[in-house]
Image (cartoon, grey):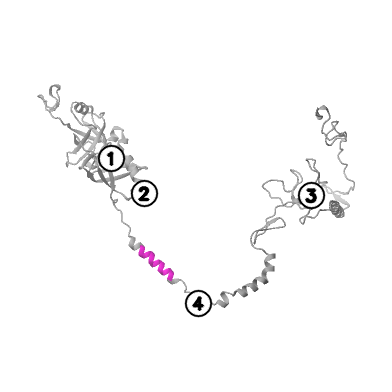
Amino acid sequence: MMGGWGFAGGGYGGGGFPRSGRFEEQYHCYSVAYADKAHLEKGDKILLPPSAFDTLARLQVDYPMLFRLTSDTDSRTTHCGVLEFTAEEGTCYIPFWMMQNLLLEEGSVITVNNVSLPKASFVKLQPQSVDFLEISNPRAVLEHALRNFSCVTKGDIIQIPYNNKNFHFALKEVQPQDAACIIETDCNVDFDAPVGYKEPDYAAAAAAATSATNSVASSLPKESAMVDRSSACPSPATMSTASSVTNADDDDKANGIRIVNGKIVRPDSVEPEGPTTKMVADSIGSTGVQRNAAIPVKAPEVNYWAVNAGDGARLDGKNPVALKDKEGNEVDIRKLRAEAAARRAEAAAAAGAKMTATGQTLTGKEVAHDAKRAPAAPVSKRKTKVGGKYSRLKTSGVAFKGASNSMK
């Protein structure tokens, strides 16, 4: 034990050791913002000068190093830890919220003593604003924030920043004594009601809800429990007679979704129909509705396939299937084609009757209408020399001629 050794000339006379085994010095204190370390406001660490480290190195102090700060004006005290020994000689830097607890101004004198504190077992906090209730998980937030603290002192108001806002908590109770260390310890934390918090009056709310329910019930019209069975509840005989009369109508007008003639019919709804086949353009870019998967097209009737689908030839070479109508009867293709040709002739005659004998050009000159049609474009009569599907030279059932068509 080196404590108790002393030399003439004060505590450090002749380069010897301090006469006392405890560290006690006075410094001018400033907020950590003066040292460009504003992040220290999140905890209770302070900055001391290098000479303090030299003195503490000669002493047998407990680690982690904890200190008691005492104000020389009204003897207010608090406790803290140390982060670095980089302050100017004769000065120390402490968090501003700690200066507020000690009622100090920038440059005030404080006394710094090293102390040994027991491990904290219980801490009770009181939020200084009801805004703390808006935090979804306050215990997790507080546990994360207290990692920057070394010790707690009863009566202090600590500051914890969270979500761009500073929350203040008053230390109402600390066990096992008024000041304790919270480094590497299991400590139980409890919360007191925030300042300005009012407990809701559940009894008054329940009474108001009951009165509102009673008022609504009293405003409803009263109904008689007696019912006229002759009008409201018909007898089984009457029901059977009525059902026998309406069965025929129910068959014609069935309820619900049903299938009629191969189509889905929904009740009280009009079946949406797309453009008819006549409105669909013959080719891409021509006049009419363009074929597009986004545009529903009404399926053509069987007459359309009989007239426009040729003889029903299939691309796979199989025999065509006879066309049938909705009832399943085979359709007479020749008759349908004759009727279609007659309609086309009637339409051409009507168009010719509407056409005048003369016409007028863009310049206003009257000219006679030429009934002759423009000559059709010449069609090439050449055929491929390969015996393909549409070749004149086709004599076999294969697409090409050669030795490769025979299996040997």
State yes or no: residue 211 in magenta.
yes
The amino acid on which the numbered mark 2 sits, given as a three-letter code, is Glu
State yes or no: discs 2 and 4 in contact (Cβ < 8 Å): no
- What span is colored magenta in the figure? 206-217
Tell me the distance, in whole angstroms, between the alpha carbons under discs 4 and 3.
67 Å
Mark 3 lies on a secondary structure that is: helix
Q: Dividing the image into 4 quarters, which one contains the N terminus?
A: top left
Mark 2 lies on a secondary structure that is: helix
The amino acid on which the numbered mark 1 sits, given as a three-letter code, is Asp
Tell me the distance, in whole angstroms, between the alpha carbons under discs 2 and 4.
56 Å
Residue denoted by label 4: 226
Tell me the distance, in whole angstroms, between the alpha carbons under discs 3 and 2.
73 Å
Residue plotted at (67% across, 70% down): 246
Residue denoted by label 1: 186
State yes or no: discs 4 and 3 in contact (Cβ < 8 Å): no
Question: Depth-wise, is mark 3 or mark 2 nearer the camera?
Answer: 3
The amino acid on which the numbered mark 3 sits, given as a three-letter code, is Trp
The amino acid on which the numbered mark 4 sits, given as a three-letter code, is Met
Viewer-side residue, 331 vs 289: 331
Viewer-side residue, 226 vs 384: 226
Mark 4 lies on a secondary structure that is: loop
Q: Dividing the image into 4 quarters, which one contains the C terminus?
A: top right
Mark 1 lies on a secondary structure that is: loop
Which mark is drawn over residue 88?
A: none
